[in-house]
Image (cartoon, grey):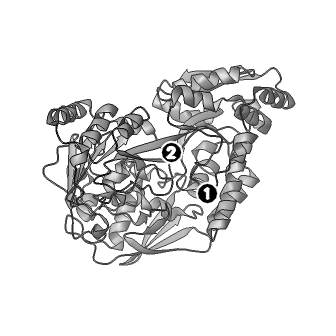
Amino acid sequence: MKLLNSTARGSSAVLAGALLLGSLTACGGSSQATAKADTSTLTLAIDSDSASFGFDPLRVSAAQRQFFEGLYDSLMTLQPDGSAGPGLAKEFSYNADKTVLTLTLKDGVTFTDGSKLDADLVKANLDRRSDPALSAYSAVAKGGAQEIASVDVVSPTQVSLTFAKPQPGFEKNLASTTGMIVGKTGVADAASLAATPDGSGPYTLDPSTVKGNKYVLVKNDKGPDASKYAFSKVVFSVVQDPQARANALVSGQADVAMLTSSTVDFAKSKGVGVSQIGGTVNTMISFDKTGKTAPAFASEKVRQAIQHAINRKALVDALHKGDIPAWNALPKDSAGFTEELETRFAYDPEKAKGLLAEAGYANGFEFTIIASAQTQTDLQAVQKDLAAVGITMNVKMAASTDEAFAAVATTPLGYAPLNWDNPVGVMYGVVLNGFTNVQKATDEQLSAATGEAAAAKDDAASKAALTKLNIRLVESGWMIPLYEALTNQGYNTKKIKQVEFAGTNAYPLLSSYAPAS
């Protein structure tokens, strides 16, 4: 559960990418057709430097999870269906009111520094949550949406997490970077992690690694789950240029590559496989549902008018080719997705005008939204749609990071990508109690649906609750979805089986890569 910044993946050094590009183009030669299916080496061409902040897994977000999965184990593991399963914690349980989560740890886990897994080590890791540099801990630190109030050692193999407020479903967070555990040396001297990882993962970092260029991981047979990883060596090659990544895949120099909408057709024409997954919905978020910053936003009809005013298909056709328009708050592969919303809130400027009139804004109204370089173009397109129904949306570029963060309290509407891999976590940690609701607005239907989803005992109950939740998010205008971004990953069909994604997570599990034969 966290907001994902798609631009964070492009933060690696240009020079490193250029150096690697030179080596790739100079190699030439082997075609994909000659590649042999084996388990010796898996090479992934990635779009950014996963270790630009060093090897502390708690300084990165979900975009770097796949790389750090090779070096570190998490307290829980993400399963192929997107659920959370046992990891370093072999069992977990909650107290009755979901304010305490108790973890029972595996025995015999050793870190690269020689230290052993125990409850004291887990506590030492989680007690780092007050460090503002650890982005993975931002939501669980003091004052965070999912604040961990205390971590207590119950026994050498048991540790309990006590939350500031009930946190059903929190275990899912421990299946990503938040749950990754660093060895004793790394915890005691976090600065050492800048150059040296200290994990218990299925791989260790090979000396042939060239930081910012390529990262070479070799199998760690002592890792508790090493047998789940098919390849003896995994190489992460940093290739920033989208066409160069596609070329590396087609030429056989990479087995897997992150593709963009501009390179998917090229890759397919050359016979490579392409797996596609959604999961990230780019959404306008109503920060203000009470009218504090803009009186009109206190009206549900006004927020519904905005839903009808936006031409999502035109937005995608013009600016996001290869992605899909979204009328659902939840992704298309989510259990709560429903086609009903596509017609119920279809593009209809006249209906938008009617709703505005019913709400007392027949002559429209004016408000300001804060934009960034990444969101400006989209917001300018929406701006034109809203103007056509009488709403003046002023798009102001953020003058500073402080202004961008303050927007949740100073402006009525925001725009960000939301990953819904853990809907209950997003609702409790971001939407109902989190930073997108600083006005403390309430909605009984949203709260009830979230509670039902958290308490669901089977797939049918979960689907019913999530569908109810999804519909109400859109109906209420708390969420105004625009489009769902699709992740495209190309793979060498001669060497790699079709790449599988975990549920609606935007990145495949490193363990999901398997040889074609």
The answer to whether 477 is drawn above or below residue 35 in the figure is above
> From this viewpoint, is residue 138 visible?
yes
Q: CA distance from mark 2 to mark 1?
A: 20 Å
Which label belongs to residue 335?
Answer: 1
> From this viewpoint, is residue 132 visible?
no
User: Seen in the image, is 208 located left or right of residue 166?
Assistant: left
The answer to whether 396 is drawn above or below residue 3 in the figure is above
- What residue is pinned by disc 2? 3
Neighbor class of circle 1 (other Cα within 10 Å; few <14, some 14-19, many 20+) is: some
Give residue 206's position: percent from left, percent from top: 16, 54
| Residue under the image location 60 percent in, 55 percent down | 428
Give residue 380's position: percent from left, percent from top: 58, 22
Disc 2 or disc 1, which is closer to the eye?
1
Front residue of this view, candidates 43 and 202? 43
- What element does badge 2 sit on? loop
* Mark earlier in primary sequence (2, 1): 2
User: Seen in the image, is 418 located left or right of residue 391?
Assistant: left
- What element does badge 1 sit on? loop
Report the quarter where the C terminus lies. bottom left
Occupied quadrant, residue 362: top right
Amino acid residing under circle 2: Leu
User: Seen in the image, is 441 located left or right of residue 222?
Assistant: right
Give residue 152's position: percent from left, percent from top: 43, 71
Neighbor class of circle 2 (other Cα within 10 Å; few <14, some 14-19, many 20+) is: some
Give residue 97's position: percent from left, percent from top: 62, 70
Front residue of this view, candidates 43 and 411? 43
The answer to whether 335 is drawn above or below residue 391 in the figure is below
